[in-house]
Image (spheres, rainbow, N blue to C red):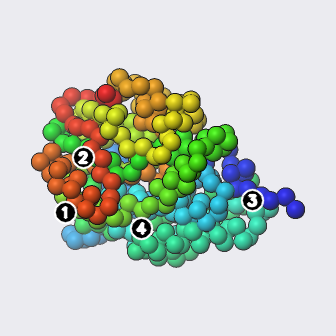
Amino acid sequence: METVTLTSLARAGGCAAKYSAARLEKLLAGLVPAEAEDLLVGLDPADDAAVYRLDPERAIVFTVDFFPPLVDDPRAFGGIAATNALNDVFAMGGVPLLALSIAAVPEELPVEMLGEILAGAEERVRDAGAILAGGHTIRDDEPKYGLAVVGTVHPDAIWPKSGAKPGDVLFLTKPLGTGIVLQAERDGIVHAGALDAAISSMLELNRDAADTLRPFTPNAVTDVTGFGLLGHVHELASRSGIRVVLEADALPLLPSALELAEQGVRTGGDRRNRDYAGPHVESHAAGPLEALAYDPQTAGGLLISLPAERGAVLEATFASRGLIAARVGTAEAGAGVVLH
């Protein structure tokens, strides 16, 4: 009997399957945000998750995220999809409490594979300190999986992406290149160990990074996913009313990601991300590094903006806990994004 592979059933995988950010921006511009005093974060402006205040001490963080398979290992796919959704709660400064599965699967997909997807997700949810409590499954020709996640945050401790200030320094907590590495795997040219490193990175929850960051009271935080580093930096800069200057040579990269980019490996998300952020980016970087800055990430790291005087201590604290905190740029007065 022919073995069914998950990626053979998907047109695009992971966050590279995201709807065009430029089109999404136009679509959301036509929606009137709900007027509710306790809706602390909604569509105006949109962020990584919605936040609703319950009382002076508690607010709920609510997000949903799902996508087609990006790897053939069903347990890894479930784990990556769950990590990607849970990370939205961490990016808001919250702690996940409860998750529900969202699954769409072809009828020909063996039930054992769906079981492995759910098992991989449950493992990540449990490691995040939350509970996978149910979900909804439908039939679809293209498999998709993800989570709706509810968490909590103090109403005065939300991390928006719109709070960066001139004089801030910017840090990134995971290496870039998942999109390019996964595309290289599909093209049959991935370097030894590169795929394993990408999967390991995508399975890493941003829980420890968020817990380490919390005492530093950052001005702005977002997680880097399908719109690429430059897409998410553009959103942070435009919504904060500042200019961000990034140093291409300082960007943390997955093993072999730069070599693959130099070979011309790109995803379909590269073009969409350039359409979205490109008009706002002044790039002086070499082509391969620029491509990695536009590369759509899945379950990427936190992008952090905080006052410069706290930067050295943050770097030392992250390093002491075996975590990445790569200083990648600065915020200044002005508008737009510069990639040196």
Q: Which quadrant of the rendered structure holds the N terminus?
A: bottom right
Q: Badges 2 and 1: C-beta atoms under 8 Å apart?
A: no
Q: Amino acid at mark 3?
A: Pro
Q: Which residue is mark 1?
A: 215
Q: Which amino acid type corresponds to the residue marked 4 in the rendered image?
A: Val
Question: Would residue 295 be found to the left or right of residue 137 on screen?
Answer: left
> Which residue is rendered at x = 58% and y = 62% of the image?
76
Residue on which disc 4 sits: 150
> Which residue in the rendered view is the most extreme toward the front?
192
Q: For this view, does 317 lie left or right of residue 172? A: left
Q: Can you identify the residue that label 3 sits on?
A: 106
Distance in Å between CA atoms under marks 3 and 2: 42 Å
Lower position in the chain sequence, tag 3 or tag 1: 3
Label 2 packing within 10 angstroms: few (<14), some (14-19), many (20+): many
CA distance separating discs 4 and 1:
23 Å
Amino acid type assigned to the residue bearing label 2 in the image: Ser
Question: Viewer-proximal residue, 55 or 203?
Answer: 203
